[in-house]
Amino acid sequence: MKASEIRSKWLEFFASKGHTIEPSASLVPHNDPSLLWINAGMAPLKPYFDGRVKPANPRIANSQKCIRTNDIENVGKTRRHHTFFEMLGNFSIGDYFKEEVITWAWEFLTDKKWIGFDPERLSVTVYPEDEEAYKFWNEKIGIPAERIYKTEDNFWDIGEGPCGPCTEIFYDRGEKYGDLSDPECTPVGENERFLEVWNLVFSQFNHNKDGSFTPLPNKNIDTGAGLERFASILQDVDSNFDTDLFQPIIQATCEIAGVKYGVNAEHDVALKVIADHVRTVAFSVGDGVLPSNEGRGYVIRRLLRRAVRYGKLLGMDRPFMYQLTAVVGEIMGVYYPEVVEKREFIEKVIRTEEERFHETLSDGLEILSQLSDKAKQEGVTEISGADAFKLYDTYGFPFDLTEDYAAEHGLTVDRAGFDASMQEQRNRARAARQETESMKVQGGVLSDFTSKSEFVGYNELEIQAQIIGMIVDDALVDTVEEGHVCQMILDRTPFYAESGGQISDLGTISNDSGVAQVAGVFKAPLGQHVQQVTVQSGTLRVGDTVRASVDKAAREDIIKNHTATHLLHRALKDVLGEHVNQAGSLVETDRLRFDFSHFGSITAEELTEIERRVNEQIWKGTDVVIEQKAIADAKAMGAMALFGEKYGDVVRVVQVGTYSIELCGGCHVRNTSQIGLFKLVSESGIGSGVRRIEAFTGRHAYKYMDGQIELLKQSASLLKSNINDVPKRLDALFGQIKELQRENESLQAKLGSIEAGQLTDQVKQVGDAQLLAAKVNAGGMDALRGVADELKVKLESAILVLGAVAEDKVNIVVSVSPDLVKRGFHAGKLIKEIAAICGGGGGGRPDMAQAGGKDPSKLDEALKFAEELVAKQTV
């Protein structure tokens, strides 16, 4: 059975059991800073599990793409370690529990319509105290007691929060994978015969801060099964890498490298690593993650470089991974179209990174050469573990490559030190890593508040409404008096709740009895808009009829900025390429901020064109049409879905003529002419592959531009010019400055020559070398080097040590003539000790070096010390 069939059967089966099929979320967690990657099927569903959001259907199933990199060193060396994998899951949010999930698991695994495993080959493990699960397996399903194993490991608990027992299902792969006479050859032992295929977690307790456990008000089910493991069993192959999920990639790599799979063990490991890593990199880039030196980008860079290094073992010294992107798309595109749709961009990113790494390897070899030379000069025979680890971590140099190079030069490498540095890094990563499943404790009044609240603020900004709920300190109250803060829910509200980058509305809620100021609005788990208010006067009560009024001026500024972000998004794609995707936004009253994915810098000309295109749409006065449509129809129109957002069956489509079509729940102008003006004020990189634009619209754009014109007027006044002639006047001034600089350099050279002539009288004979150590007048390091150059012409054989004070800092230059360099004098070594006396440092070549110092009062002492240093080296 093909892997794609297994995935389809999983989703079809659970759909038949009343589950909503949740599409795979992006690998980049959305609104979850605790996670670096989505690394479990339930990770994108955390808002449902912790009560922040109530799902429309409490039964959910998915096939979720995941990344885990904690065991990266085992990838390719074991049968089932991967960095990218698919987790099949079914979930119950307070609906069905143990009996249903166990019954359905057995049906799916053993019914020939679905997976069709031989029931005799299945065993299970349970938590010793979970008699309920034991009885379901034994008495209802009919698994004999000898195939039900009790183990303390079957309890899912990550500290404070939901937890509970679990049951794991194992498949017996047969005699060729282990002998039953071996005590370890059981589902609870270390062996290859019994393969875990599915874990069912019964989340029924809350782990409290004091260490106690209490029953959860709503019991949940969270299960996970590896698609790759299912495939290895159903395709009857030795490892996950022999399934149809990996073999096409491996065979394509063999063709590029000119090797065969299954012939050479070392080559096989390399082929498996490449196949695994290219899947991870392709999917990550497709989800907007680009190689960098931090965070997710660092993980991708490390995996890509690791694959390239293994490619070298196969004799590939050129970029090759990018060629495998198409194969990944052919295998996975049936369910994950993004790897096909973004193929060209993914290939470009991977190829660019490969080319850079090949250059980096050359740099690493140069550093390794320097380390080797240094070791020999210092009389040691070993390269330190710390240096070897730096090469590995910074330049992607594998330890064995460092070892091979060292051996060629008669050196060894400190393996223990390297391992210690590696472990320190793992410890740091482990300390920084948050547990995937960490969730808030269930509960809270808002989770149970079921009364409906209708948002009418798209078209109405002032309405009559009724207070249906007020909450103070997580408790429902009937009244709130002057000076108190509360969360208020109305039966209908004009106030927009912060979401999609758009900030919430401000305004007032009032009647004859009291007035409340709205400071912010957010959505409750069941979707109601919750106003955060302060009662400024009087008293407000549940049941009161009130006047809800949005701050109209603020809303008008917000909608101008929001529609402008849509125009900007389209303009960025038009100018920079379709690979540009929104990576975050902020729509406020006075500005907009737009983060987007882009691989490279943006030129001034491109920014000008982007701004022009946005303003062009504003000046056209195009109507903004907003409609509710079926998600399929919206996508058929070409509507852009924003990064990380979830959408229902019916979506809100915001369309600006034929220029921009996006799915959006925010507030917008009715016609682009209402925006008035768009002014881009800044563009910068905020991370590798992510850039940020900030801009103003409407009156704020006018205010900004008026301020710029005022600055220009002030500049013109200072230049004694009119505004139009400012560039011409500046050009003239720059010309004058350059001429003055040339005159200054000429005068400095003449002064240096004069001073050099006067200094020759101060030359001393120190041993068998001539030394001139003197304090001179020089306005900077350039001038000081000029004096030294003049003296080198006059003194054919000498050591020059010249010092000068400029702007309360010390500059020092040391020059050694060629004949004295041959005798062992070294300018760089001399200056290092001389500058140290002045509180500074520096270095340079044997014949020329320069340094700075912080203490001018020590310059005379330093020059005197120069004579002592030279005397020690002379005969």
Image: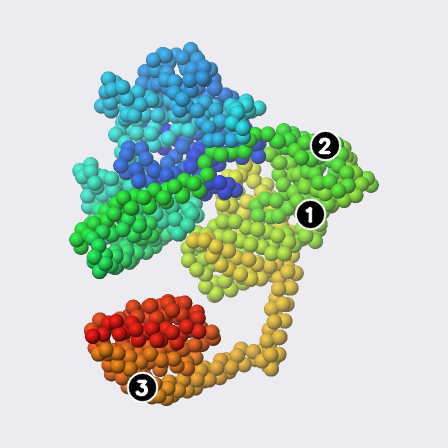
Which element is circle 3 on?
helix
For the N terminus, give its image quadrant. top left
Q: Which mark is residue 477?
A: 2
Q: Residues within 10 Å of mark 1 (few under 14, many from 20)?
A: many
Using the rendered image of the protein, determine whether residue 727 is visible from the camera's viewpoint. yes
Count the labels in the image.
3
For the C terminus, give its image quadrant. bottom left
Q: How is the image coloured?
A: rainbow
Which element is circle 1 on?
loop
Q: Position of residue 97 (x, y in %)?
A: 50, 21
Residues marked 2 and 1 touching at CB (< 8 Å)? no
Q: Residues within 10 Å of mark 2 (few under 14, many from 20)?
A: some
Report the front residue among 240 and 798.
Answer: 798
Amino acid marked by disc 2: Val
Amino acid marked by disc 3: Thr
Q: Residue at x 64, y 64 (%)?
A: 702
Label 2 vs 1, first from the N-terminus: 2
Q: CA distance from mark 2 to mark 3?
A: 94 Å
Which element is circle 2 on?
strand
Q: Residues within 10 Å of mark 3 (few under 14, many from 20)?
A: few
Q: Is label 1 or label 3 in front? A: 3
Q: Is label 2 or label 3 in front? A: 3
Quarter of the image for residue 603 reads bottom left
Q: Which residue is mark 1?
A: 506
Amino acid marked by disc 1: Leu
Q: Is residue 24 left or right of residue 281?
A: right
Label 2 vs 3, first from the N-terminus: 2
